[in-house]
Amino acid sequence: MAPSSAPSPASRRTPWRLALAGLAALACGAALGAFAWLFLNVTFFACDRLWNGLAWGAASSWPAHPATRWAGLPVLMGAVGGLAVGLSQTCLKGSAQPLPAIIGHLRSGRPEPWRASRIAPNLVAGMLPIMTGGAVGPFPALIAAVSDEWLRCRRRLKRCAGADPEGQLPQPERYALRGLALAGGVAGVVLGRLALRGIMVLPRFAAVHWVPGAFAKGLVLGVGGCLVVLLFQVLCRLFTGLGTRLERFPLVKPLICGVALGLVSLILPYVLFSGSQ
């Protein structure tokens, strides 16, 4: 008798299994969306309390006009924030990763081994620079926080659909599951906002009205922006080399960065905080 062959992945993908995978994609997206909204709200709430409450209140008596408050506060806060980041990296072993590294991890499709002990340090590492006024947005930290969970969800969705977790679903099914997960994520954000009534809002932008000379001004600003980008690339190479030399001093590097940011903010105050602030 000829040995019976195992069913192929395609034969296991029944409509019922695909429907189950679709429901699971909605649920996973909703859970991650609600978590993202909670993470952002906690981070920005802590930033607001730290700067508008504790720090400003310590800088002068309340109530007081902001112009009369201590001008050197951003430098002190930058130093405190840099020291806090260095301590979290040294003691908690949590480190915020740059966005290209996070994207590369997502493209690899292989989640890190799940360890409950690493959740809190990684979240703290992502929140601390934003809370203390760092000129970084929350999205690298947020993507890092949900990347491994999304990779695990994706593998489970493939199993629900009857496919090999290491393989690829056919393109229509893959796009359908991604769309359902995205819809679930939006639903999770909306439900989180309705339930928590957080301090963040979904951005709304008014229509841009045409004015004479706007096109010419746009060209000038565009050229200026390109020059700033070139300067940014030069400075990135310079400070990347400096940062490499300071790898042996985990407390010194973020401390220098925080103080430097505070000093720059004395001239350019809008350099502080996330762009979404």
Image (cartoon, helix red, strand yellow):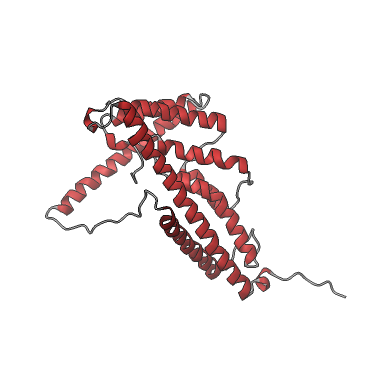
Q: Residue at x 47, y 61 (%)?
A: 182
Query: Which quarter of the picture shows residue 133?
Result: top left
Between 261 and 80, the one lying in front of the other is: 80
Residue 95 rendering spot, x and y as whole percentages: 52, 36
Compared with residue 11, is residue 45 higher up or lower down, i.e. above or below?
above
Residue 153 rendering spot, x and y as whole percentages: 58, 57
Residue 274, can we see it?
Answer: yes
Q: Residue at x 40, y 26 (%)?
A: 79
Between 17 and 84, the one lying in front of the other is: 84
Residue 93 horizontal side relative to residue 33, left or right: right
Between 262 and 34, the one lying in front of the other is: 34
Compared with residue 96, is residue 245 higher up or lower down, i.e. above or below?
above
Residue 155 rendering spot, x and y as whole percentages: 61, 58
Residue situated furthest right in the rendering: 1
Residue 266 rendering spot, x and y as whole percentages: 27, 29
Query: Which quarter of the picture shows residue 237?
Result: top left
Residue 268 horizontal side relative to residue 109, left or right: left
Residue 50 horizontal side relative to residue 150, left or right: left
Residue situated furthest front in the rendering: 62
Compared with residue 154, is residue 121 higher up or lower down, i.e. above or below?
above
Q: Quadrant of the N terminus?
A: bottom right
Residue 96, can we see it?
Answer: no
Q: Quadrant of the C terminus?
A: top left
